[in-house]
Image (cartoon, grey):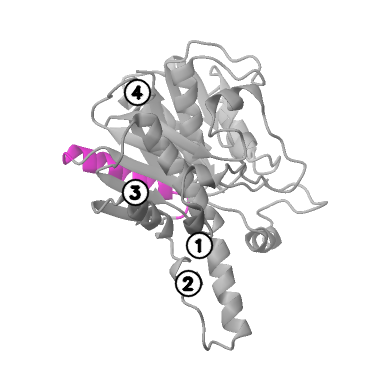
Amino acid sequence: MKAYIRSTGNISPQHSLNTDSFFLTRVKTSKNFFKSLEPDYDDFVDSKMIRRMSRIVKMGVAAALTCLRNAGIEKPAAILTATAYGCLEDSAGFLRKMIEFDEQTLSPTAFIQSTHNTVGAQIALLLKCHDYNNCIVHRAFSFENALTESILLLQEGIGPVLVGAIDEITDDRHTILSRFGLYKKKGTLPANIAGEGAAFFLLDKEGGNHPQAILRDLQTIYKPEDSETLQRYIQEFVKKNGLNMSQIDLVLTAHPGNAKKDEVNDQLLKTVFHENQCFPFRSLCGDYPTASGFALWLAAVLLKEQKAPIWMEGMKFPLKNILIHNHTADIHHSLILISAC
């Protein structure tokens, strides 16, 4: 299992759409959740179309078009989008209209734009791409399954593949999930700091000109029995790819900024990752189901640039192999291994 990451595009709570800005400035939040830093969408889409797009659609379209521009590609051979929650803003708007109008004389616009595949469909319409298009909705494994399907398409000779991870935070979602103790709300700790983002990647069997990194392998682990079992899975995953833990130059961990929920990650730091450089990627993007998309973008950028942002202290270079460990509630674990070209 191997694919080249030819280019990326990422809208996140950091200055990630422009790599130079990302390396100079780190954005922190004093609120209970991270919000993405959005660009001027007029640079991507006609202003008349922008007015009909919800926020998550605009984010996804801008990230996807940035990815294609960086690769010098007008149109991919396939489009795959991954999301756990879909277009929440439009879904909430439609439900409110149902109540307001007593389920009568409803405009279909909000319903049409509330479906999970809206982002992928909008990208295809803009690019006039009539080829393979699929949306993966599988909770915290959504992006990992989209990557797996991308690899399968490449193995069948379909490429390059544009694959992305998109989820948004809304006031409604934050309020509801905070009631379950998942996300931080004002004056309460411990809890995760919520986030959002739209990260896209152009994958291909061939590197083309100056690829960013190589996606070597990925694995998902559902409900490991205990910490020792998870440690064994990680070690076997690394060994399967012809490496040992000492050859992993950086581990991006899934610390959600929650002292209580960090126990799983802290245990790994004391055991299987005790000799590795580690960095908590969710401290930059917040906690959301497809945050591994941000982690993959961060790993690809660090491997390509071979330097640390000025705010990331103590990072040792060069980097050759980066392991991403992501998990949600110690239920959905995933491992992604990427290497420098």
Q: Position of residue 79 (x, y in %)?
A: 32, 48
Image quarter where the N terminus lies is top left
Viewer-proximal residue, 146 or 92? 92
| Amino acid type, mark 3 | Leu
Direction from residue 65 to residue 262 in the image, left or right: right
Q: Which residue is mark 1?
A: 52
Front position among marks 2 and 1: 1
Direction from residue 311 to residue 205 in the image, left or right: left
Viewer-proximal residue, 2 or 64? 64
> Which of disc 1 and disc 2 is earlier in sequence?
1
Direction from residue 126 to residue 110 in the image, left or right: right
Element type at mark 2: helix
The answer for how far apart the CA atoms under marks 4 and 3 are is 20 Å
Image quarter where the C terminus lies is top left
Report if residue 143 lies within the magenta region.
yes
> Which of disc 2 and disc 4 is earlier in sequence?
2
Which secondary structure type mostly characterizes the magenta part of the structure? helix
Residue at x 64%, y 38% (from the top left corner): 263
| Amino acid type, mark 4 | Pro
Dot 1 crowding, Cα within 10 Å, few <14, some 14–19, many 20+: few
Front position among marks 4 and 1: 1
Counting the numbered discs, the total is 4
Q: Are marks 2 and 1 in contact (CB under 8 Å)?
A: yes
Q: Which residues are magenta?
A: 139-157
The answer for how far apart the CA atoms under marks 2 and 1 are is 9 Å
Q: Which residue is mark 4?
A: 211
Q: Which residue is mark 3?
A: 80
Dividing the picture into quadrants, the one containing residue 241 is: top left
Q: Which residue is mark 2?
A: 109
